[in-house]
Amino acid sequence: MEWPVAADQGTAQELAKTLREAIQRLSRRVRQARPIGDLTTSQLSALTSLQLAGALTPRELADVERVQPPTMTKIVGKLEDRGLVVRSPHPTDGRQVILAPTEQGRAVFAQFEKARNEWLASQLAELTEEEQETLAQATRILQRLAQA
């Protein structure tokens, strides 16, 4: 199926819709490219957030993941049961705990990242050199937009 390209779009609104849809489809496809395992998407997302942040309180993790604290409690419980996340006392607030990935959690994260990167690299390798350069330029623009 051919999707409309930016040059075919007349307005910023139309470009926004087409770009958002393409990003969502690609993101979904990259998420599907993962090793066989029984981690849920929510568990993997929480583990990824902890890996990227280093450590977070349960509330911070719930905020990052945009879920309610009770939902995050269940997710973290499953990750703890699997030995992927560890709780430690908060350094300044005795009522809080800090969540961080364990060595095993970091290894699982690395496996998922490797599978995703390999899938995407294989797809990019199918493109022409010109298309790859266009994507490199688009990547810089998308990174700038993401920071806005």
Image (cartoon, rainbow, N blue to C red):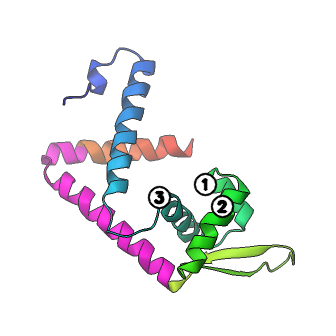
Q: Describe the element under mark 3 as helix, strand or loop.
A: helix
Say left or right for 109 vs 6.
Answer: right
Q: Is residue 18 above or below residue 41?
A: above
Q: Is residue 119 magenta?
A: yes
Mark toward the viewer: 3 or 1: 3
Is mark 2 in CB contact (under 8 Å) with mark 1?
yes
Mark toward the viewer: 2 or 1: 2
- In the picture, which quadrant includes the C terminus? top right
CA separation in Å, label 2 and label 1: 8 Å
Residue type at the position of mark 3: Thr
Residue located beneath label 2 in the image? 72
Along the polypeptide, which appears first: circle 2 or circle 3?
3
Q: Is residue 111 magenta?
A: yes
Residue type at the position of mark 1: Glu
Residue located beneath label 1 in the image? 65
> Residue visible at 16% across and 43% down?
130
For the record, the magenta segment spans 104-133
Q: Is residue 129 above or below residue 108?
A: above
